[in-house]
Image (cartoon, helix red, strand yellow):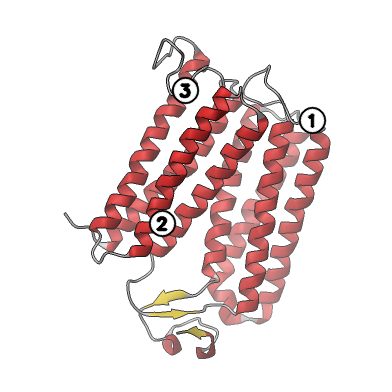
Amino acid sequence: MTLTPGRYRAITFAALFALGAIIVTGAAVRLTGSGLGCEDWPGCSSTKLIDVSSKHAAIEQVNRLFTGLVSVAVIAAVLGSLVRVPKRRDLLWLSLGLVGGVIAQIVLGGITVLVDLHPLAVQGHMIVSLVLVANAVLLVHRASQPDGGTAVRLVSPELNRHACAIGALTAVALVTGTVVTGAGPHAGDEDVQRFGIAISSAARAHGVAVWLAVAAMVALAVRLRDRGSERAEIAEWVSAWIFVALLQGAVGYIQYFNDVPELLVGVHVFGATVLWSITVAFVLRTMPLRRVEQASSVPGTVSAALSVS
């Protein structure tokens, strides 16, 4: 059995989609108060491996079963890297990173249940999920690159550093968002422990982090006005990031001033996952990319002087 690069790329997209989707289904478990629908792990209870006798148990079971589908997608990425022609070591290691992350998530999910949804465990669960999404975006990015060719910079190192700063600020915004979750009302169960932080204070810190990231991206857009070739390479990613970030901000403010309704919180989690995926892809776009053409003939490059040997 062999796989073409195009078919393997499709497998990596499937793995990325599955890893993003399980973040949303995990949020659905918490938002419906089903976090302790199964009181044990890996079985649903001490007497039943699978239990759908109540709504909360059924919702938690569906999320656990979906973890199995994610595992299949990740394993397919690993096996695909082994039969892809030509075989590439970087794709194998990145796909193995997904396996390690999924195993960590399964273990952490069990710990989260056993410690009765302690907010630190729930927060860690979300952060590991975002790391996994970043790994998957990187895998898709690498799988989309040609097997040979020349490494070329599409933007200057200074813009790459600016993009990395935006990525760091976005990560801070997402982490502070998990603190808001840990202080808010949607803990997954009515009686579990919360962070001892006023939700207004946590939301304020999160909002500041978000607006700092938006300001940094707007500053980058301003810098691109006089850089036609570089703007042509990353303008779509900049526009997509700003669009999703502003939508996220709107949803965040609406949900905050309406007592954080479950549906809007779920939309906000979905938006955060999309924004993080765009952020990672955008930062990768500003790094050297492999092109089959020679560096001096690649359209849209800054100059041959930016080529990376």
Image coords of residue 42 (percent x, y): 43, 24
Is there CB contact under 8 Å for labels 1 and 2?
no
SS label for mark 3: loop
Q: Which amino acid does label 3 sit on?
A: Trp
Crowding near the residue tagged with mark 2, few <14, some 14–19, many ≥20 C-alpha atoms within 10 Å: many
* Whole-number angstrom distance, CA of label 2 to CA of label 3: 28 Å
**Relative to 95, residue 150 above or below:** below
Q: Which of marks 1 and 2 is nearer the N terminus?
A: 2
SS label for mark 1: loop
**Relative to 193, residue 154 above or below:** below
Image coords of residue 75 (percent x, y): 33, 45
Disc marking residue 94: 2
Disc marking residue 196: 1
Image coords of residue 304 (percent x, y): 50, 90
- Is 253 on the left-hand or right-hand side of 8? right
Residue at 33 percent of width and 76 percent of height: 148
Q: Earlier in the sequence, mark 2 or mark 3?
A: 3
Is there CB contact under 8 Å for labels 3 and 1?
no
In this view, the residue in front, 265 or 141, is: 141
Q: What residue type is labelled 2?
A: Leu
Residue at 78 percent of width and 39 percent of height: 202
In this view, the residue in front, 218 or 197, is: 197
In this view, the residue in front, 10 or 136, is: 136
